[in-house]
Structures are given as structure tokens and as C-alpha cells.
Image: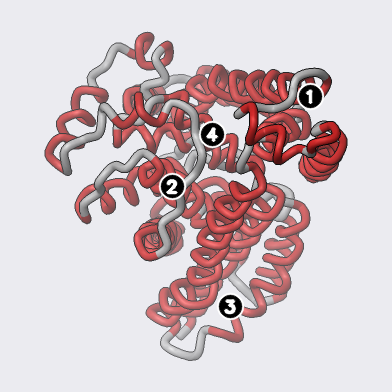
Amino acid sequence: MAIGLVAAVCVALLTRWLGGGTEGWEAAVARTGHVPEGWPAWVLSTGELLGDLFVGALKAVAPVLVFALVMAAIAQHQRGTETNIRPVLVLYLLGTFAAALVAVTLSFLFPSELVLKGVQKANEVAPGGITAVLRDLLMKLVSNPVQALANANYIGILAWGLVLGLAFRHASDQMRTLLNEVAEAVSKVVRFVISFAPAGIFGLLLVTLLSPDGFSQLQGYLHLLGVLLGAMLLVALVVNPLIVWTRIRRNPYPLVITCLLESGVPAFFTRSSAANIPVNMALAKKLGLHEDTYSISIPLGATINMAGAAITITVLTLAAVNTLGLQVDFATAVLLSVVATLGACGASGVAGGSLLLIPMACALFSIDNDIAMQVAGVGFIISVVQDSAETALNSSTDVLFTAAVDQAQKR
């Protein structure tokens, strides 16, 4: 993805330098109101094509991905598992929900806005507070499953995935294995689409940089990235230590710092919670944790403990809300935190998984799917840093909360 970023900046700078002719780029754009004709316009149209193809592919695969992953994850649940690691599960869910609340708070304090197409159209369907949001939510829950997939109704998709997943818990092992393989097949399709991210990012960023106020738009991206990283740091260094303290009742920072250094740093560079499982297992053994606990909780945490993903979903969704000028009350913001928490639990196993779940959260505010996927596209532009920081927070928290529960039981 970094290749796409660097290439887009280089091509944009070169086009702005050479494409304005004798009068210069800024003067030519100011006089005509658009990119100069000739090869600069061809460069812009190429960027638009690459960006539109990438966003279109994401829009096509995202509904099927959410449906398959949620249904398979629920169906694979084994009875009795939660009784062994229930305190860890509670911390996982509490930490993810707290992270979403932190993201909501920072998004209100430092609101981000993006440059998106079709803002006027989306603004016409602004919800009228929590009552309207809940009514719309209930209507989407009872949508026909085929229509939900076809219309990218993520609330309906999530509901049908949960219901069918619960039903398939009682199916044969072969059927549940089949569901798991279907989810893996869809994940491979998503990974194939994501493999074209450098080209897609190149196109999306190139169009931004060649627009009349292109480089000023980068300030919005940097502001958005600052809110994301600020929320993740606040969770890692304040919220998580507070949660750990409630369990161990002593200074949590030695344990927090150990987990960040020995788990978070490797995860930052691998950008994969699954790939960091062996690292966390080794750290858990080094910390002297009970093997029967961490052998289950750490792989499970790599699947459902997604505080960083909850932050990403919440911040980018509220950036879309701010861009469209929608008003969000406190109750709706809490509801968004719940949806982000649930969505984050299904974001594992796929590169950029949290970004593909943004439309599900945007559906709370009746934001058009085209707008939501543009927001996801912005997320991919900043994902070089965002995804690394998100994975570092997610993975280090897996072993941190497991250690907190284990040490609390030994007190």
C-alpha cells in the first residue's frame, strides 16, 4: 500500500509541475475550473478509473463477507467454552466497547470531515434522533435476506448471519465445517481484492491530489489519522491499564508495557493478529500464565478482541456523519459503540477487515452505501499506519487481558 501512496504523490507532483503549460498549474486550473486538457486530464481519468474499480470491488464483496464470517463464527461456537475463559471474554468485550466509547468521545471533541462525492444526496436522508434510528434499525432487521445482500443492508445481513449461525450450532460437524470453509473462501476473495490495494490507493489519492484543493485535503486525512492514533494510544495507556487494575489491584503498567513491547511491536510490523499468535503464546508462557487458559483465550482473542477495529469503525463512521452534516445525540452515539463492538468482533482474519465493516455502522444513519465505501477508501489511504497501530493494540490486548485474569485468580 505504501507503493501506491508514494507513486500517487510522485505522479501528482510531476503532473502539477509539467501539466500547467506556460501559465502554470494553479493559474490554468483557476482559469478553467478543471484539470488542463491533454495528458494531465488522461492521468486524472486513469486515477478515477483505478479508484472506482477498487471501491466497486470492495462494495461487491463486503456484504457477502460480513454474512459469511458472522454466520460461520457463531456456528463454530462450542458449548462449554465460555465457562473456562468467561472472565477473559468479559474483559475482551468490555475493552472493545470502552475503545468504541473513547473513539466517540474524541470524534466529538476533534470532529473530522472528508471530501466525498454525493454528499447532498446522502444529506437528504438524515435520521431524526435515536427514535428514528431505532425504528429504521428494526425495519432493516426484518429485511428479506436476499434483498439485504443485494442492497448492502448490513443491519439485515448481520441479523440473518446471527440467526442462521445460532441455528447451525445444532447442525452436524460436516455442515459447520462447510460453513467455515465457505467463510474462508470468501475471505480469500477479499484478500484477492485487497491485493490490488496499491493500484486502488494510487487512483484514489491521485484524484485527490490533482483536484484544485488537493493538497489541502491531505490535512483532513492527517487530522483523521491523528484522531485514530490518539484514541488507540489513550486506550492502550489509560483505559486498558484501568481495566487491568480492576482485576489485579496493583500497578498495571509493568504488565502493560511488557505486553506492548513484546507483543504490540511485532504485531505493528506483521499487521496480523493471527500471525502474532505464536508471539503471544510465547509471552504468556514467559509470564507464567496457566496454559489451559491462554491456549484458548489468545487464539480466541485474535478473533474477537478488536479494540483497534472498534476505534477505526467508530471514528470513520462519525467522520462520514460530520461530513454529511448529520446530528448525533448521545444515545445514538452509544448505539454506534455497540454496533462497532459487534462489528469489530467479525473483523479478524481479513486485511482491512475493519474498513470493510464501516458500511454496517454507517447504515445506522441511513448513509448511502456509495458514500460509506468512499469512506472505506479513505481508510485504505491511511491504512499504512492505521492498520499497523490497530493490530498492535488488538494483539497486545489479547495477552494483557489473559494475564490480568490469570494473575487475579492467583491472588
Residue 378 position within the rendered picture, expressed as x and y whole percent measured from the top left? 58, 40
First in sequence: mark 2 vs mark 1? 1
Q: CA distance from mark 4 to mark 1?
A: 28 Å
Q: Residues within 10 Å of mark 1 (few under 14, many from 20)?
A: some
First in sequence: mark 2 vs mark 3? 3
169 displayed left or right of 15: left
Residue 178 position within the rendered picture, expressed as x and y whole percent measured from the top left? 57, 18
Say which residue label 4 marks. 356
Q: Nearer the viewer, mark 4 or mark 1?
A: 1
**Amino acid found under the numbered disc labelled 4:** Leu
Residue 27 position within the rendered picture, expressed as x and y whole percent measured from the top left? 70, 38
Whether tag 2 and tag 3 are in contact, CB under 8 A, the answer is no
Q: Nearer the viewer, mark 2 or mark 4?
A: 2
**Amino acid found under the numbered disc labelled 3:** Val
Q: Residue furthest bottom?
A: 250
Q: CA distance from mark 3 to mark 4?
A: 30 Å
The structure residue drawn at horizontal position 45% and vertical position 53%, both measured from the top left corner, is 112
Say which residue label 2 marks. 319
**Amino acid found under the numbered disc labelled 2:** Ala
Q: Residues within 10 Å of mark 4 (few under 14, many from 20)?
A: many
Q: CA distance from mark 2 to mark 1?
A: 29 Å
Q: Residue 43 shows which numbered tag?
A: 1
